[in-house]
Image: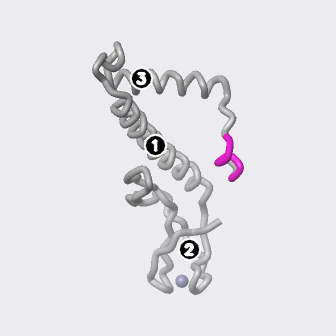
Amino acid sequence: MSKDARKQVNLTDDARKKLADCVAALASCGFGPEGPPLDTTFAEIEDFGHEMGRLLARALDEELAHQHAAHFAGSASCPRCLTECPIAEHPKARDVQTTDGDVSLHEPACHCPVCNRDFFPSA
Ligand SMILES: [Zn+2]
């Protein structure tokens, strides 16, 4: 996914269908299979939609970060002493606070035995 994708995302037909299915499932979870009752205000509908958007954003953050972390393998140079250090095969989870709430990220990490410090490899 390119940085340009942040500006405009062209969903495939399959993705549109899955999004519609996801929307229907979330709406049903929030208001039941018959939808919002008659006395529901638009503000309540909007609040629910916003919360579901934040939920989707957190899920995307975790999925994309996981995919991104998979690109890191092998070793990386310590930023302080340049020793080649192995990248941990099983990244540790780290809770990160985003604008949409807390997400658990599995980031690639290295430990430099010379400097006795942990660091995150960079691209
Ligand atoms: Zn080092």
Mark 3 or 2: in front is 3
Residue 44 position, x and y percent, is: 33, 32
Relative to 87, is 2 on the left or the right? right
Name the residue carrying label 1: 59
Pointer 1 residue Cβ closer than 8 Å to ligand 1: no
Q: Is residue 89 left or right of residue 40?
A: right
Q: Is residue 1 left or right of residue 115?
A: right
- Reading the chain from its start, which is encountered first: label 3 or label 2? 3
Q: Amino acid at mark 3?
A: Ala
Query: Is residue 39 or residue 47 the one in the foreground?
Result: 39
**Residue under numbered circle 2:** 85
The part of the chain drawn in magenta is: 3-8
Above-or-below relation of 69 to 18: below
Q: Crowding at label 1, few (<14), some or many (≥20) Cα neighbours within 10 Å?
A: some
Specify the label residue 101 is tagged with: none
Amino acid type at circle 1 is: Ala
Residue at image position (58%, 22%) is 17
For the residues labelled 3 and 2, say whether their Cβ atoms are less than 8 Å apart.
no
Question: Within 10 Å of the Cα at label 2, are there few (<14), some (14-19), or many (20+) other Cα atoms?
Answer: many
- Of marks 1 and 2, which one's residue comes earlier in the chain? 1
The residue where tag 3 is placed is 25
Query: In what element is the residue under mark 3?
Result: helix
Q: Position of residue 28 (x, y in %)?
A: 36, 21
**SS at mark 1 in the image:** helix
Q: Is ligand 1 closer than 8 angstroms to the Cβ of mark 2?
A: yes
